[in-house]
Each structure stands twice: as structure tokens, then as C-alpha cells.
Amino acid sequence: MRHTFFILALLYSISCSSQIQKAKNEDLEGTYQNNETAENIKPLLQEYQAVRLEGTEVRQITSKMVKGMEYKLYISLPDNYESSTDSYPVLYFLDAWAQFGIIRQAYWLLRFYDEVPPIIIVGISYEGKTEDHVYYRARDYTPTKVPPETLGRLGDFTPISGGAPDFVKFLEKELFPFIEEEYKADKTDRAIFGVSYGGLFGTYALFNHTDLFQRYFIGSPPVWWDDEITLKQESDYADDNESLPVKVFVAIGGEENPASYNKLLDRLLGRNYKDLELTSTIFENETHMSVVPAAHSRALRVLYK
């Protein structure tokens, strides 16, 4: 009798476990179906703490200059910021959605050995997915409108263009006042770091709004944009100015096409501008993408030494 009862109890236990497991599987299947991919279920199953960069914070600002656009700001503050009465140079960093971790950690490592001074880094980013960032950066960083169908393969990453004039207004009239009111920012010492289209924006600012920044990192700039509009803007600047009182670092990867890089450097060197501190580097064996970490680290050392 006891033997029979044990078998019945065991079968009942197995049945219950089976039903419970079936219910769990159904719940998981429902979750997969509702979220479409297994990848999306991971946040439901994991409750681990996210990695956080100490000394950083996220702010948001809504622009009237760029059609009510909401920008996300990734801000890195120097050590002892809260207790200090100093004001700090500010580095405005483009493409922060993809590269903020690179610039922030490169800066931290260089600060560890006092190779750069304490600075505030303001990474400018966007809300949304990767395709949203690609759209907004193409709009904000390009100086003129160019039909995407004329850009070949690059047209897939440039569905819109020509928004740099509005983006400059956002920087000058909205972002700078916000940062300089909210933080201990030195209004006389601003830098702009940009790569690729970000580098193109750097050249636009350099020749059209020179005084906005005192330090420029221009990485892998597509000077070919819109029939080399950058070189035309430089010519217009040169017609009215003998001096270019800024520090500029220009860099590309050795495996990139050097045509744009060479044309920009030849133009700047040929003008012999007064007060221009110009440094340039080709990073051997680096591509358009792989050059980014090395170039950012070098730019910090060159522009802040």
C-alpha cells in the first residue's frame, strides 16, 4: 500500500512539475512572440547593474533653432569638480552616441599621468535607434544640401543634409548658454571634436564661425562634399582675414583616401595664416573606423598640451 502511494505521489509530482514547466514555457513563448526576438527578453531575465562611468551625467535640451529637436547631452566632469572654484575648458564632442566612451576614457587615462588639464566634456547625442542617429548627424553636420542619389553608396547614410547652419545656431544660442550657466565652464576656451561628417562640420565652423571655438579636431573630413564647398568657404575667409587664431589638429587613417586631407592641409599651409597652430597626422594601417580611438587620444594631447 505504501509502495503504491509512493508511486502515485511521484507521478503526481512529475505531473505538477510538467504542468509548471509547460506554463513557464508558454509564458516565455509569449514573451518571445510579443518582443519578436530572443534578444529582447534578456532585460526581463537579467537584473544586473549597468556599467556606469563615474563623474558623468546625462542632461537633455530642446532646441528651437533645430525644429524642436531634443538633444541628449553626455557630460563628463573633472575630478574634484564639486569642491573646486575653478572654471574649466569645455570640449564639445560630436557623435557622442557612438564615441563618448572612447573620448571619456582616453581623457581619463591621460589625466591619470597629467598629460592633459582638467576639462569638461559635453557629448552631443540624440534619442532613438542607430538609424535615427545616422539621420540626424547627416542633417546637422553637413553645410549644404546634396541629393542623396548623387552620393553613391554614401547616400544610404545621408538621407538628409544641409542643417549645419541651424546646428551652429543651436550651439551658439542654446547649448553654450546652457552649459555656461549650469556648469563651471570657461567661456573663452571651447573645443570641437568631430570625425567624418563631424570633421566636415568642424571645417564649416572653422571658416564660417571661427570664434565659436579655440581648439578644433578635424578627423577624416570629406572635403569633397558639394564640389569642395569647404575650400570655397576657406577662400572666402582668406579674402577678409590674414589671421586664423586657433589650434587645429587634422588626422586620417593611413588606409583612407588622402585626397581630402591633403587638399585641406595644402590650403591651410599655403595661406600661412598668422596665429594658426596647425598639427596633422596620418595614422598608418588605420581605416576610417579604426583610426577613431587613436585620433581622439592624440587630439587631446595635441590640442591641450
Image (cartoon, rainbow, N blue to C red):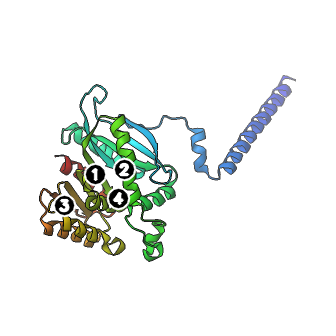
- SS of the residue at dot 4? helix
Distance from disc 2 to disc 3, alpha carbons, whole Å, reads 26 Å
Q: Position of residue 276 (x, y in %)?
A: 15, 57
**Towards the viewer: 121 or 15:** 121
Name the N-terminal-most of marks 3 and 1: 1
Q: CA distance from mark 4 to mark 3?
A: 17 Å
Q: Earlier in the sequence, mark 2 or mark 4?
A: 2
Q: Earlier in the sequence, mark 4 or mark 1?
A: 4
Q: Amino acid at mark 3?
A: Ser
Q: Is residue 4 above or below residue 181?
A: above
Q: Going by the image, does 20 lie left or right of 78?
A: right
Q: Alpha carbon of mark 3 to alpha carbon of mark 1: how far?
A: 21 Å
Q: Which residue is mark 2?
A: 171
Q: Secondary structure at mark 2?
A: helix
Can residue 156 be seen here? The reply is yes
Marks 2 and 1 close (CB-CB < 8 Å)? yes
- Name the residue carrying label 1: 212
